[in-house]
Amino acid sequence: MDRPITKEEVIEACKWSGDGHITNQSSTMPKKFGTNTKSAEARAKKEAVKIADKVKKEKEAEDALWNDDDKHIARKQQRKEERDKKKTEQLEKKAVLKQMYDEEMNSIKAAKTRAEKVTRADIAALGERQQKAQKDPEELLLHEKPLEENINRVVVEGEEARTVDEAIAVLSVKDGPADRHPERRAKAAYDAFEKQKLPELKAENPNLRLSQLKQMIRKDWMKSPENPLNQIQAGRF
């Protein structure tokens, strides 16, 4: 049976180190005393550094993730603003086009209304002229279709002549020989008469048509002393 180790043997086997820890001086002596405090502190510091690095990396990764999310949000917001802006521009264009269309339609309606008013006014004026013409034959004559020119019609003592030759024949029964070319003289006289009267009547009646003005000239010619037939008839009587 082994004997117990004495105190002296323990002291002799172990020596105290300068940092207060017992150092094993014998390779055969087992470690039966406490943990090395310095080594524990070093391990603790090392572990703390590792944990801090891990926490830092995790925080950086989380921050990077948030930054990516912020970029996506910013891009989404930008796209939304662009869509809203485009939609607003389209609505503005539609509003402008609608306004232009409405203005054009209003202009067309106004022009149509004016045309209808003028047409109705013309119809009313025409009706008034027709009613007046029924009372005034001369007015009716001005607005009717011009008659075929017949400036040489004359009636003498119940006999009627519609041409210059007939008129000369009627008027020269008792007066002897007449002009050899009376139709030329009558035509030339009428042309001169029309040339003189047309500007005057046109100035006095600017709204009348040329055919109406010529109708008035023919009426005046029938009574004019410049008409050779009137001259012949006046000489007859």
Image (tube, rainbow, N blue to C red):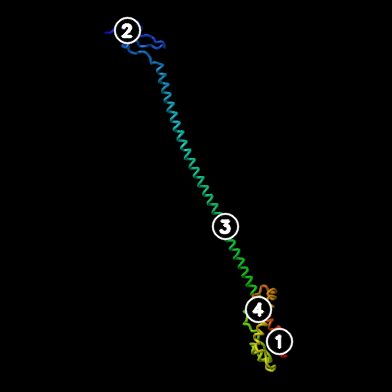
Residue 9, horizontal then vertical, whole percent: 33, 6
Q: Are marks 1 and 3 in contact (CB under 8 Å)?
A: no
Q: Are marks 4 and 2 in contact (CB under 8 Å)?
A: no
Distance between mark 3 and mark 2 Cα atoms: 119 Å
Distance between mark 3 and mark 4 Cα atoms: 50 Å
Mark 4 falls on what kind of element? helix
Say if residue 107 shows up in the picture: yes
What residue does disc 4 label?
214
* Residue occupying the far left of the picture: 1
- Which residue is found at the position 69% from the left and 73% from the top? 203
- Say which label, 3 or 4, has the lower sequence index: 3
Q: Residues within 10 Å of mark 3 (few under 14, many from 20)?
A: few
Depth-wise, is mark 1 or mark 3 nearer the camera? 1
What residue does disc 3 label?
100
What residue does disc 2 label?
5
Say if residue 135 shows up in the picture: no
Q: Is residue 232 above or below residue 21?
A: below
Depth-wise, is mark 3 or mark 4 nearer the camera? 4
Q: Is 196 or 222 nearer to us in this picture?
A: 196
What residue does disc 1 label?
231
Q: Is residue 173 left or right of residue 32?
A: right
Amino acid at circle 3: Met
Depth-wise, is mark 4 or mark 2 nearer the camera? 4
Amino acid at circle 1: Gln
- Say which label, 2 or 1, has the lower sequence index: 2
Q: Residues within 10 Å of mark 1 (few under 14, many from 20)?
A: few
